[in-house]
Amino acid sequence: MQLTLHARQPFSLHSVIYSHGWCQLAPFKEDASQAGLSLITRLENSQVVELHLSETPGGVLIETPETLDDQAIRNISEMINWMLGLDQEFSDFYALAGAEPKLAKAAARAQGRILRSPTLFEDVIKTILTTNTLWAATKRMNANLVAQFGDSLPTNLEARAFPTPASLAAADEATLRAQTRLGYRAPSVLALAQRVASGELDLESLKHSDLPSTELRKRLQTIRGIGPYASANLLMLLGRYNFLTVDSWAIKMVSQEWYNGGPVTPAQVESAFEKWGDWRGLAYWLWDWTRV
């Protein structure tokens, strides 16, 4: 099956795929030969499918060897639209960025969209796995979760989708600590899965919430394991750019850019992008940190 979806222009699939490191986390797989992306995902009807995404004039081409009914096709269309932000609008940001040399190429590169997972549940879990660790460890923990708890592709039992809330909720903390090797993150992952699986927390409804960003941030921080850094990251994925993902890397970059390598506080990082208003998080994310 082939399906073409239109994207609001300008659009670059390459810019979305490499907007951050999610493309390196299972069940995503970079497809360098076609400058695209593949993923294995579980549809609403419980069917596990493999999707191949590539850019086509005006949008994105979705290909799968699977036989799909109309409901599954609609499900995939909605999923890919969300993952790639096909309907997102950045003209206001581009107008501001055009006057800043460090952001002047953003429009030409069609930057701004940030790759999302099919579900917010998957994005929250992956974000928890990025905290206080090296990227290599994040990839390992995520791969373990998928391999141990994800549903298999019928034609390739080694290929798996990201675990459902129910599959993780049925696990136990000891297994997640020792076998999945999540360490101290195990209770957070288990608690989130149980809250979502039980219906206590409707994460997916937050995708299109009309809550102000400050209130949405508070809601996200009620999730165990989600603090200021993680909530700012998730707000970015939700298309809210009011907050910065301030970590040690951000402090280092701002120090080098504006303070000659001297000591910098998180407040000074925030202040450096304050003038960008509601776009401050995206301005920081796309800033050209190379030294002139």
Image: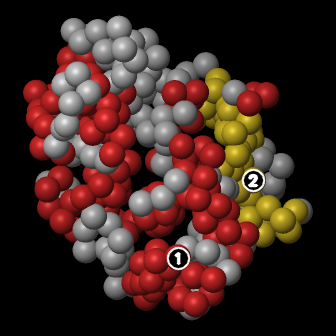
Residue tagged 2: 50
Q: Is residue 147 above or below residue 264?
A: below
Task: Give the mark nearest the N terminus, 1 or 2.
Answer: 2
Picture layout, residue 180 above or below residue 267: below
Q: Residue furthest front?
A: 262
Could you say which quadrant of the image residue 223 lies in?
Answer: bottom left
Q: CA distance from mark 1 to mark 2?
A: 30 Å
- Depth order, front residue of 191/245: 245
Q: Quadrant of the N terminus?
A: top right
Specify few, some or many for label 2: CA neighbours under 10 Å numbering under 14, 14-19, or 20 or more: many
Q: Depth check: 272 or 115 in front? A: 272
In the picture, measured across the screen, residue 243 lies left or right of residue 275, that is right
Q: Quadrant of the C terminus?
A: top left
Asked whether residue 283 appears in the rendered view, the answer is no
Q: Is residue 43 shown left or right of residue 279?
A: right
Residue underneath mark 1: 183
Q: Amino acid at mark 2?
A: Glu
Instruction: Tell me which residue sits at (80%, 56%) in the image.
Output: 67
**In the picture, residue 220 is in which quadrant?**
bottom left
Label count reads: 2
Question: Of discs 1 and 2, which sits in the foreground?
Answer: 1
The residue located at (21%, 30%) in the rendering is 262
Secondary-structure class at tag 1: helix
